[in-house]
Image: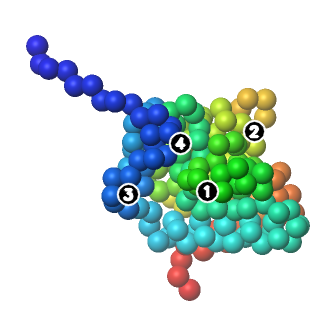
């Protein structure tokens, strides 16, 4: 009989304190560290563009909210995900100001930009975890399929609307936002 090896599961607190001395980024999935591959520049350009658009809308409406890129959100007892972009209220940030940038309560909006290695994670696992957390709005920006899926939390599940091409996104969180799929996807290209 081969010897068995036991892998210790990390608690959320262990995850927050974890430092392997590298620049590697990890998500916590059922107590295990899962290394995230660095995003492409196209991915980062689209995420930055979305963050800038949301920041501008927040400022225009004088909402006082904060928009962050590449920050975490706790999605369970032994789970924490890294989002591409999310929006938090001042109350959500104030209690964590000197702690790791991991939201402990549901962001108002979470955005993920799909990469070839994140299709299942973004469409299935994060969708399920974000719904369980009751994140009111979740965007899946998919440059592979040239579409943006806007998911709106409703009675325990997400209602989804898919936008393509020159369609303007419809966002309950930002009802006056004027942003098309083409504009988001074009942000991933160099001028």
The circle on residue 24 is 3
Q: Residues within 10 Å of mark 2 (few under 14, many from 20)?
A: some
Which one is in front, 65 or 186? 65
Mark 2 / mark 3, whichever is N-terminal: 3
The Cα–Cα distance between marks 3 and 1, rounded to whole angstroms, is: 21 Å
Q: Residue 153: which numbered mark, if any?
A: 2
Secondary structure beneath disc 4?
A: strand
Q: Nearer the viewer, mark 2 or mark 3?
A: 3
Could you say where residue 123 lies in the image, as x and y percent from the top left? 56, 43
Residue in view at x 83 percent, y 51 percent: 172
Q: Quadrant of residue 147?
A: bottom right
Of the image marks 3 and 4, the number of the one nearer the N terminus: 3
Q: CA distance from mark 2 to mark 1?
A: 30 Å
Question: Label 4, on which residue?
Answer: 80
Between residues 20 and 63, which one lies in front from this camera angle?
20
Q: Which residue is mark 1?
A: 98
Relative horizontal placement of residue 119, taking residue 73 as reference (left or right): left
Q: Earlier in the sequence, mark 2 or mark 4?
A: 4
- Disc 3 crowd rating (10 Å Cα; few below 14, some 14-19, many 20+) is few
Vertical side of 78 occupied by 173: above or below:
below
């Amino acid at each position: 009989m081969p010897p068995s090896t036991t892998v210790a599961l990390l608690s959320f607190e262990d995850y927050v304190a974890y430092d392997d001395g590298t620049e590697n980024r990890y998500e916590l999935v059922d107590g295990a560290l899962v290394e995230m591959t660095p995003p492409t520049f196209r991915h980062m350009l689209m995420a930055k563009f979305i963050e800038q658009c949301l920041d501008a809308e927040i400022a225009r409406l004088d909402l006082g909210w904060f928009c962050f890129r590449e920050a975490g959100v706790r999605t369970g007892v032994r789970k924490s995900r890294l989002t591409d972009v999310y929006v938090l209220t001042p109350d959500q940030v104030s209690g964590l100001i000197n702690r790791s940038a991991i939201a402990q309560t549901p962001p108002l909006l979470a955005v993920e930009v799909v990469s070839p290695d994140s299709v299942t994670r973004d469409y299935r696992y994060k969708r399920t975890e974000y719904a369980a957390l009751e994140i009111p709005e979740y965007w899946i920006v998919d440059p592979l399929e040239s579409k943006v899926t806007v998911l709106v939390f409703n009675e325990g599940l997400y209602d989804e609307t898919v936008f393509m091409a020159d369609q303007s996104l419809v966002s309950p969180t930002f009802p006056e936002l004027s942003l098309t799929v083409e504009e988001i996807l074009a942000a991933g290209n160099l001028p």
